[in-house]
Amino acid sequence: MGQYIAPLRDMQFVLHELLHAEDELKQMQKYVDIDADIINQVLEEGGKFTSEVLFPLNHSGDREGCTLDPVTHEVTPPAGFKAAYAQYVAAGWPSLSCDPEYGGQGLPMVLQNSFFEMLNSSNQAWTMYPGLSHGAYECLHEHGTAEQKALYLPKLVSGEWTGTMCLTEAHCGTDLGLLRSKAEPQADGSYKITGSKIFISAGEHDMVQNILHLVLARLPDAPQGTHGISLFIVPKFLPNADGTLGARNPIFCGALEEKMGIHGNATCQMNIDGATGWMIGQPNKGLNAMFVMMNAARLGVGMQSLGLTEVAYQNALLYAKDRLQMRSLTGVKAADKPADPIIVHPDVRRMLLTAKAYAEGGRAFSSYVALQIDRELNHPDEAVRKDAADEVALLTPIIKAFLTDNGWIATSEAMQVYGGHGYIAEWGMEQYVRDARINMIYEGTNTIQSLDLLGRKILLDNGAKLRKFGEKIRVFIEENGTDEAMSEFITPLADLAEKVTKLTMEIGMKAFQNPDEAGAAAVPYLRVAGHLVYAYFFAQMARLALAKQDGGDNFYKAKLATSRFYFARLLPETAMLIRQARSGSANLMALDAELF
Amino acid sequence: MGQYIAPLRDMQFVLHELLHAEDELKQMQKYVDIDADIINQVLEEGGKFTSEVLFPLNHSGDREGCTLDPVTHEVTPPAGFKAAYAQYVAAGWPSLSCDPEYGGQGLPMVLQNSFFEMLNSSNQAWTMYPGLSHGAYECLHEHGTAEQKALYLPKLVSGEWTGTMCLTEAHCGTDLGLLRSKAEPQADGSYKITGSKIFISAGEHDMVQNILHLVLARLPDAPQGTHGISLFIVPKFLPNADGTLGARNPIFCGALEEKMGIHGNATCQMNIDGATGWMIGQPNKGLNAMFVMMNAARLGVGMQSLGLTEVAYQNALLYAKDRLQMRSLTGVKAADKPADPIIVHPDVRRMLLTAKAYAEGGRAFSSYVALQIDRELNHPDEAVRKDAADEVALLTPIIKAFLTDNGWIATSEAMQVYGGHGYIAEWGMEQYVRDARINMIYEGTNTIQSLDLLGRKILLDNGAKLRKFGEKIRVFIEENGTDEAMSEFITPLADLAEKVTKLTMEIGMKAFQNPDEAGAAAVPYLRVAGHLVYAYFFAQMARLALAKQDGGDNFYKAKLATSRFYFARLLPETAMLIRQARSGSANLMALDAELF
């Protein structure tokens, strides 16, 4: 039902021509041996695996869903998921970007990121099983003891075991300070964990022998609120020191949630009934440790929506070329057919190009951030590492919220191209819309991302991180400001950059008087920031395309047209958003809650 | 599982205070006896019926769906649907606005419209069973022979039988000119109809004894395209002259579609295998006759999304007052609780107010249009009838597309208020989003509505209809232009009205050179027009609220706050839309189809 072909050409364009990933990576000792051939080979293999193995299970997985055995508490994912996971492990995909010390292949994040896009294009629900392992890996790698790392990391790296994040409880999601799960210290240094968690993605399944649950809970003497939360690793089966499996730990799936989408993934209510766990990191500092996992997850969620945007676009395009309906307003285009293919109609093209531009903009932006993560972690120059870390911190909430909002818009437009057929499950388009919807919610709602960006990442340091990133844009504008061919891109980019500066100062001053001003502006502000970033990347891509468009490679013609579409049709959203962000908090706060 | 309480106070405000429906209706002979008491009583009874009988079946209907017996081809809707329909018929609801000559109660459309909103708030999927009967009723009432009317109308009016619209075929939806179903004339004046139809809502079910299918098909000698389509009535059971049922007609449900939403409604593939039918209206003029039904249906689809917007808002509001999560940024608000209710947070209020404003704007606008239909059909003055008809023609595509786009936005925002719980079926919010999605597609996609508005309704008569409506806005602006308290509403309204005039002229001139310019501008243009209409109604409502806000009735305080929110937060979308509409067709058409 439909198709997915990994967009290798565009990925290569982004990595090699736009970001010069090979040159950048060669500055890092860890990656001196990475060249374009290796990158292209991994992309190609990844494209084959995702198209051939995972994509065919996407629609059937949605229709079938997961089943829970109420007696054994075991969960069975949709048919084919387990076998596909075995292939994934056999091919070594779980270890792609992991530390060679624990069996990883040590490839850069920027490459992992492209592969992760493919995984999500082909099957978001499936990808969430190994996807959460990666967060658990990073959390343990940074905060685990040497013993914990030795015991758990090789299993996560190989994919033999998977991981979960157990944060949410029925009464608290955003506000983790309210959580109630308890951890009682035991004489042997372990803890007995008791509590009830909800919304645990991939919380139980039969694809691996063991599942490592990372659980937030409170010590008996813990202070209230977020400063009294600790993090524990609670394996489904208690591992022996040699890695073999011991006793079943009492952490059970009590129920599966019925959801709008991602039906192929098991969203579990987990009952933890005196399960044995071990602390990760320091007492009461669990949220700090978990944030490593959450930051990785936030980037991952953005990539989920990028993947859906791409696959929805590909299929809508096929349909628009194939479906015959009405004649072009400018005259018959396919005289040999009873009607013209609907791609002749301007508004069908608007829908297609919206998805195409959000896919290409998101790909450029997220690949850039992934490369910055590589620099943050591996660059020899501490100042470069620091700058990269600042940028990643600034851009992570934008990746999460902007890409997922755009994914919602794009998948819905792609579905609309199909007319009534888009609403029918058989065609597969409505699944993309349903799957995309969760990405705006989990790992911190998009409102939370917006407050994080505006409050914590921008206002808290008086805009220092934003100015550093803005300086890059300013340099680009200056370098290209005299190129007449570039003025259609540079003029609006410069205009928006100036407006963002003013808007940030204005909101900052208002928020200083009244914190609700930040809350009232945050969501439109984040989208303005997202557009500034996309405008910057589309302008860079347009520059490359302008230089190469006459070379006979139509790729550059298309890239230029997509860039122009972005500036003409999507960037104007900022005219609305800036007005909304400036409109202040009174229009939201004036009405008493009882009068709503 | 949530709640629905009909918004009686706001409906009464719209009908009595904003539209003075009673005075307007008294100008029409048919409605001289309608007073406010009658209107209020019907609204109250309607509220009870929809809340108590239909709403409790909404979620269960979605989960259960419909089932087809592959042997008998009979369809069983979800549990409770049939019994609820029997109650609906017993209470006389089907006949509310129907012609007393055929057993109707002869109540005005403006009242029927409010009741229809309630029906859709409580259960869109259920409402589609009787909803399509109403279109069939109107079509037969206008185009049927005296004999056809006598035979069929009493059954549709009483609700004993229901109707369908059989237009779409697998290869044609928008482009009905391509349809292939055939009608062979018979010696007795009937026709043998053969063909295959898809997406037939309420095409088969057990809630009534007989179903009247209105089927588009071609006569043997029919010209190609839309001028060769005739309309036939094809009953499931052939009625005898006395209204009793004769033979089963070979028009069978071959399959039910699996859809994104409206699971409680049977979306049927209908196989018509030499079924007996009778022509409605003239040969080859079937589309004209069907358009009566389609115009009614288009208004109805707008009302479906208005209903969903209202019920999604009501439930999100309950949740926002109840759910405790984080403290207000301006300090603790509920010191006795572990956290503040989330309605203290500005962005939660933004989401709630978006749904609230779209519900209240849509209610005012659609009630106005319904009253215009009453005037079009019943006013003694021919000039008034003509003006009303022009306005209804102009505003129908805006009702359909603007209200359904807004319903998609509003239900999604209301769902987002719930965080992760919004994505879980149990809470009911994600159903509203899924149900709302079809409304942007069926009865003419929103692109088709936009082309109808800009091309047919505006450019084709050189803007005459638009100018007439604009004149009302101009008079309102003039009357209130010197009232300082109104300037916050009048200034942006006047500004937008002027921009719409300029935009229309600009697009008209460009489209004269190149028809694709109309296609490229139509969708953002329709939303600009929608906002102009909403701004006009919110300004009128704000004027009433300003005058009455000190009387101690908090309703007016809330209305004023909602109007201010609309102008501050939703109207600014026009800044984006106008840029998009003006950006022209080149950014859409430049790229060759092969280069996408």
Image: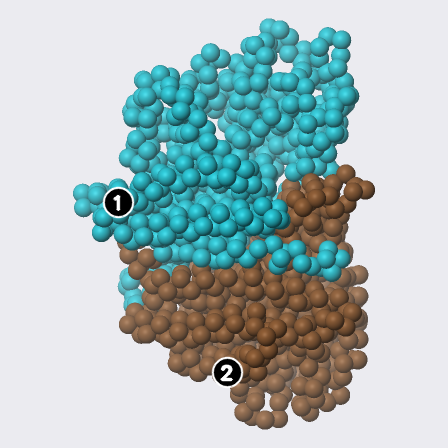
Chain colours: A brown, B cyan
- The location of residue A468, given as percent across then percent down, is 49, 83
Outermost residue, left direction? Answer: B551
Q: Camera-side residue: B571 or A202?
A: B571
Residue lying farthest to the top in this orientation: B242
Return the residue at label 1: B480
Mark nearest the camera among 2 and 1 is 1
Choose top left, top right, bottom left or bottom right for residue A100: bottom right
- Residues at marks 2 and 1, CA–CA distance in whole angstroms: 49 Å
Q: Disc 2 marks which residue? A: A471
Residue A181 shows which numbered tag? none
What residue lies at 60% left-to-right and 61% top-to-bottom? A565
Q: Amino acid at mark 1?
A: Asn
Name the residue at 32% across, 52% down.
Answer: B491
Q: Regarding mark 1 in the picture, which secondary structure is present there? A: helix
Chain ID, mark 1:
B
Instruction: State whether residue B568 appears in this view.
Output: yes
When the figure is inspected, residue B392 is found, relative to residue A459, above or below; the finding is above
